[in-house]
Image (spheres, rainbow, N blue to C red):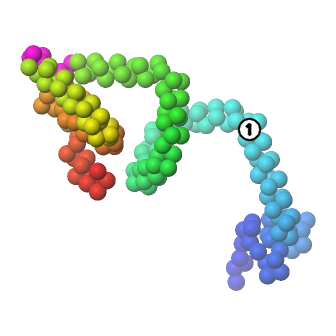
Amino acid sequence: MKAIKLKRGDMREDGMIFWGYGKSYTNNEYWLPVDEFSKLSEKMKQSRKEAYLKNKGILKEKRQKRINANREKYTLIWKNEREKYKEKRETYFKEYYKNNKEKVYLANKKWRQKNWGRMSGLLAKYRTKRKCQTPELSKDSKMIVGVIFDQAKRLSKRIGIPFEVDHIIPISLGGIHSPINLQVIPRSINRKKNNREIFKWSEKNEKNI
């Protein structure tokens, strides 16, 4: 009969808890009372934490070297992980944002301030793309664009819910900045939609609109 291998934390009938194997212990097994087990576990946890903090820089450098040496392998692993837990992550972040709006706002603000150079680069890239994809608008078309933005402001003020002007086909997907590609929608929906086409996005998120 194959012997059962014990795991740390397994409890015996007399209330003793298994810690580990060793030749110097009775029957090669080390058992502890509950309070001693808790103390030793906490001590080991604290010791590991201190060791990690002490060698954090070295561990980070080793990890980065390992990733750089196996970039394709890790890229594939991360991609599979994202796909595997995509729905779970989206649900988690939605709930987290719902319960911590102020915290998320402050964290995003802090990130933007810290990474202003990167933000400026992204905004410049967006403006350039938008400019290149915007046709030469007539005087009437420019006036209509202005009216659409004014409409968003009026709706926000009248209803009390923030509205924004959205590109039906996002600029990042080749959409143009023209009256035929603009619509006024609530800010909450615009942020959820992000850079996806509104029709394709709304089909999958009818219940959440």
Left or right of 114? Residue 81 is left
Residue range corresponding to the magenta coloring = 132-139
- Residue drawn at x 46%, y 46% is 97
Indicate the quadrant where residue 66 lies. Answer: top right
- Residue drawn at x 58%, y 33% is 64
- Residue drawn at x 64%, y 31% is 61
Disc 1 target residue: 53
Question: Could you tell me which secondary element the residue under label 1 belongs to?
Answer: helix
Give the x, y percent position of residue 170: 24, 33
Give the x, y percent position of residue 148: 18, 29
Question: 155 and 97: which one is in front?
Answer: 155
Question: 65 and 108: which one is in front?
Answer: 108
Question: 107 and 41: which one is in front?
Answer: 107
Give the x, y percent position of residue 23: 87, 66
Q: Count neighbours of disc 1 (C-alpha within 10 A) and say few if under 14, some if 14 to 19, many if 20 or more.
A: few
Amino acid on which disc 1 is placed:
Leu
**Residue 182 on the magenta span:** no
Assign the magenta stretch its main secondary structure.
loop
Give the x, y percent position of residue 7: 72, 68
Left or right of 58? Residue 98 is left
Indicate the quadrant where residue 132 lies. Answer: top left
- Residue drawn at x 45%, y 49% is 98
Name the residue furthest front. 158
Q: Is residue 166 visible?
A: no
The quarter of the picture where the N terminus appears is bottom right
Q: Is residue 13 visible?
A: yes
